Image (tube, rainbow, N blue to C red):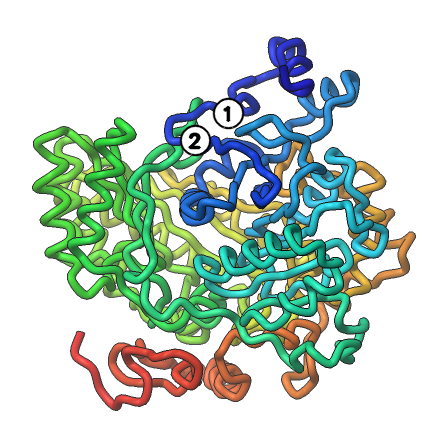
C-alpha cells in the first residue's frame, strides 16, 4: 500500500474536514504511471473548498488529462490542523489522485489568483520538501511553474518560480507540459528545457533576466507577450466535472460563456488582461450545461463571464437554459447582470416567490467619481432598477463600493451615505420592507490598468474613512455596513506593484510564520511589519507612492497586448472626469487588435 495513504488512515480521523484530503471524487482521473508519462501536480495555494470552486482548475484538469501521456493531479494547501499532523507523522504534501509526494512529480504548477496567496506558495513547496528558491533546486527537483492573474507582474515571486505562464492557458499549458515530457524522455537538463520553453508565446523565464530586466540569455524576448486563445470554440470545455465531496464556496458547475469585457472600467485588471471579447457558441453552452448537470447531479448551474448580460445572444441563451432547467427544478445562477427589464423578467421567473438578494456594483457614491473610473451607470439607472426590484418583491440589495479611488473626497463618501438613505426612504414611501447591505473594498492600484500609477491610501487613511462611513451608515435603519481589512489591502498593493526585492520580504515573512494571509484568522500583521523592517523594504514606496507614467515599471516585462499610450490617454481623461464609451459602440484604440483579431477593433460603430 502507498506509504502516504497508510499514514493518512491514521491522521484523517484527527482533523477537521478529512474529505479535503482523500480524493476519489466523481470524474477524478487515475492513470497508470509509466516512464514516458509526465506527472503534473496542479496546486491551488489555498484550501480545498476555495480551489475546487475555481473554474480554471476544472478546465485545465480536463484538458491536460485528455492527453494520453500527461497526468494532472490536484494539490491544495492543507489547513493548519492537518499540517501539524502531517509534520508529526512525516507525511509530505501529496497529490489527491494517487497520494504521490509532490516532490516526486515532474512539474508542479501554481495558479495565482490573488497576491495574499504568495506565502502559501512557499508553504506548499516547504511541505513538499522542495527547495524554496529556484537557484537551490537540482535537476532531480520538479520544475515549478505558475500562471493566473497575478502573473501579469511576476517579479515579487520570480525567485521561487522556474517558469511563468502569462495569458490564456488552455493550449499553452499542454504545450509546455508536453515539452517537459520530452525533457524527461530525452534527459535534457533544466537549462535545455528552459531554452526551448522560452520560445512558447507567453512564457517568462525569470532566470533569463537580471533584477533590472537586462537579458541574460539571447533567446529571451525583450518583453513577454501574453498568449491568446483566438476562439473559445476551438478548445474543448469539460462536460463532466469533478464533483466535490464536501460543500465548497461555489458548489455548482459553471460554463464560461465569453471571455473579456468591453466596458473599460479604469480600475479593472481583468477587463484589460482578458481582451478581446471572445464568445462561446450558444448551442455549445447549452449542451455543456446539460451534460454537466446530468452527470454531476447538481441542482444549480452558473454561467461565467465578466458581464453576463453583454453576451450577444443572452436572451436566447437564458430562454434555452430555462426551458431545460425549470421542469427539472434546477436553479440557474446569472452573476454580473445589467439590471434591465429582461434581467428582472428572468430573475422573477427563476426565483419565484422567494426573492434572494440583488447585487449592484455602484463602485462610487457620486456621479463625478463614477465618471472618473469610467463606471458608466447613472444615479437614475440605480433608482430605476431598485424601484422595479421593490415592486417585484425583492427585499434586499447589496451595494458594492470601492474606497480610496483616485480623486476621491469625503463628499464622495457622503454620496454612499446619501444613496443608502434615499433607497431606504424610497422603500418607506412604497410601504416595503427593505434592507441595504453596503460592502466597501479598498482600492488597490493594479498593474496593466489605467490606474496602475496611482497612489493607494495608507492603511490609516482607509481606517479613518471606514470609521467615517460606519458612524454615518449605522444611523440609517435597515442599512448594514461591511468592509475589508486595511493592512491586507496595503500588502496587496505592495505585491501588485512590487519588484524582485520583494522576494526577500516574502521569504522573511514566511519564515516568521506567515501563511493564509487572505484569511482574517491567519493574517499576522506584526510578522509582516517585522519582515519589512528586517529586509529594509519601504512598503509605502510600492503601495502609497504616486508613479510616473513615463517610467518603466517592473511589470512591463510582461506585455498584455494593450498599448501603454492607451492607458496614458485614459488616465488623462479620468483626471478630466471624461468617460469612454463601451467599445461595442466603436473601437477605442486600446491596441489589442494588433495581436489578435478583435470583433470591434478598427471599426467606427457597432450595433449592440
Along the line of sight, which residue is nearer the eye, 273 or 196?
196
Q: In which quarter of the image is the N terminus?
A: top right
Q: In this view, does 129 lie above or below 596?
A: above
Tag 1 residue: 23
Apparent side of residue 511 relative to residue 354 in the rendered image (left or right)? right
Q: In this view, does 252 lie above or below 14?
A: below
Task: Name the residue located 59 percent from the left edge and 35 percent from the top edge.
Answer: 76
Please say if the residues under marks 1 and 2 sit with CB atoms less than 8 Å apart. yes
Tag 2 residue: 28
| Residue 167 point in image, percent of width and height | 50, 65
Task: Name the residue located 53 percent from the left edge and 46 percent from the top edge.
Answer: 483
Along the line of sight, which residue is nearer the eye, 255 or 549?
255
| Residue 29 point in image, percent of width and height | 44, 33
Apparent side of residue 449 relative to residue 369 in the rendered image (left or right)? right
**Element at badge 2?**
loop
**The image quarter in which residue 89 lies:** top right
Apparent side of residue 138 relative to residue 558 in the rendered image (left or right)? right
Q: Please indicate, yes or no, whether residue 359 appears anywhere in the rendered image.
A: yes
Along the line of sight, which residue is nearer the eye, 544 or 208?
208
Q: Is residue 477 above or below residue 338?
A: above
Along the line of sight, which residue is nearer the eye, 423 or 124?
124
| Residue 504 point in image, percent of width and height | 84, 56
Amino acid at each position: 500500500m502507498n506509504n502516504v495513504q497508510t499514514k493518512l488512515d491514521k491522521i484523517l480521523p484527527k482533523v477537521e474536514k478529512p474529505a479535503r484530503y482523500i480524493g476519489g471524487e466523481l470524474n477524478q482521473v487515475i492513470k497508470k504511471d509509466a516512464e514516458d508519462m509526465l506527472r503534473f501536480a496542479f496546486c491551488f495555494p489555498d484550501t480545498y473548498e476555495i480551489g475546487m470552486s475555481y473554474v480554471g482548475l476544472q478546465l485545465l484538469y480536463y484538458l491536460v488529462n485528455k492527453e494520453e501521456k500527461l497526468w494532472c493531479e490536484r494539490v491544495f494547501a492543507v489547513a493548519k490542523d492537518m499540517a501539524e499532523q502531517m509534520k508529526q507523522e512525516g507525511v509530505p504534501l501529496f497529490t489527491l489522485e494517487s497520494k504521490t509526494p509532490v516532490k516526486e512529480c515532474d512539474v508542479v504548477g501554481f495558479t495565482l489568483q490573488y497576491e495574499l496567496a504568495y506565502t502559501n506558495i512557499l508553504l506548499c513547496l516547504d511541505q513538499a520538501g522542495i527547495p524554496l528558491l529556484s537557484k537551490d533546486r537540482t535537476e532531480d527537483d520538479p520544475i515549478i511553474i505558475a500562471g493566473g492573474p497575478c502573473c501579469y507582474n511576476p517579479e515579487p515571486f520570480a525567485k521561487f518560480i522556474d517558469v511563468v505562464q502569462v495569458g490564456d492557458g488552455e493550449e499553452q499549458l499542454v504545450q509546455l507540459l508536453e515539452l517537459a515530457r520530452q525533457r524527461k524522455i530525452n534527459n535534457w537538463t533544466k537549462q535545455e528545457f528552459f531554452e526551448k520553453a522560452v520560445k512558447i508565446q507567453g512564457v517568462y523565464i525569470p532566470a533569463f533576466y537580471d533584477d533590472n530586466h537586462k537579458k541574460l540569455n539571447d533567446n529571451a524576448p525583450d518583453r513577454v507577450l501574453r498568449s491568446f486563445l483566438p476562439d473559445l470554440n476551438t478548445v474543448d470545455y469539460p462536460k463532466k466535472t469533478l464533483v466535490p465531496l464536501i460543500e465548497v464556496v461555489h458548489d455548482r458547475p459553471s460554463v464560461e460563456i465569453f471571455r473579456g469585457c468591453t466596458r473599460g472600467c479604469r480600475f479593472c485588471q481583468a477587463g484589460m488582461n482578458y481582451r478581446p471579447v471572445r464568445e462561446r457558441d450558444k448551442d455549445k453552452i447549452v449542451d455543456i450545461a446539460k451534460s454537466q448537470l446530468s452527470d454531476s447531479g447538481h441542482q444549480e448551474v452558473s454561467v461565467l463571464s465578466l458581464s453576463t448580460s453583454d453576451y450577444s445572444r443572452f436572451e436566447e441563451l437564458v430562454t434555452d437554459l430555462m426551458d431545460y432547467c425549470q421542469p427539472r427544478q434546477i436553479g440557474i445562477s446569472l452573476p454580473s447582470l445589467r439590471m434591465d427589464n429582461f434581467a428582472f423578467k428572468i430573475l422573477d421567473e427563476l426565483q419565484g416567490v422567494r426573492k434572494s438578494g440583488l447585487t449592484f456594483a455602484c463602485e462610487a457614491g457620486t456621479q463625478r467619481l463614477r465618471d472618473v473610473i469610467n463606471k458608466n451607470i447613472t444615479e437614475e439607472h440605480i433608482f430605476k432598477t431598485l424601484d422595479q426590484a421593490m415592486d417585484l418583491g425583492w427585499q434586499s440589495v447589496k451595494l458594492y463600493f470601492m474606497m480610496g479611488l483616485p480623486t476621491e473626497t469625503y463628499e464622495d463618501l457622503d454620496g454612499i451615505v446619501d444613496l443608502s438613505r434615499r433607497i431606504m426612504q424610497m422603500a418607506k414611501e412604497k410601504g416595503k420592507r427593505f434592507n441595504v447591505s453596503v460592502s466597501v473594498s479598498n482600492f488597490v492600484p493594479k498593474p496593466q490598468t489605467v490606474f496602475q500609477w496611482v497612489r493607494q491610501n495608507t492603511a490609516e487613511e482607509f481606517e479613518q474613512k471606514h470609521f467615517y462611513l460606519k458612524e454615518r451608515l449605522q444611523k440609517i435603519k435597515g442599512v448594514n455596513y461591511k468592509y475589508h481589512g486595511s493592512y491586507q489591502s496595503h500588502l496587496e498593493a505592495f505585491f501588485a506593484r512590487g519588484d524582485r526585492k520583494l522576494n526577500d520580504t516574502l521569504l522573511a515573512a514566511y519564515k516568521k510564520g506567515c501563511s493564509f494571509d487572505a484569511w482574517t484568522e491567519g493574517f499576522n500583521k506584526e510578522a509582516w511589519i517585522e519582515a519589512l523592517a528586517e529586509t529594509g523594504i519601504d512598503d509605502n514606496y510600492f503601495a502609497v507612492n504616486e508613479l510616473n507614467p513615463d517610467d518603466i515599471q517592473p511589470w512591463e516585462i510582461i506585455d498584455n497586448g494593450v498599448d501603454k499610450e492607451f492607458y496614458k490617454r485614459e488616465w488623462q481623461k479620468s483626471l478630466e472626469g471624461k468617460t469612454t464609451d463601451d467599445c461595442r459602440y466603436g473601437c477605442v484604440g486600446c491596441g489589442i487588435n494588433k495581436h489578435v483579431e478583435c470583433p470591434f477593433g478598427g471599426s467606427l460603430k457597432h450595433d449592440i
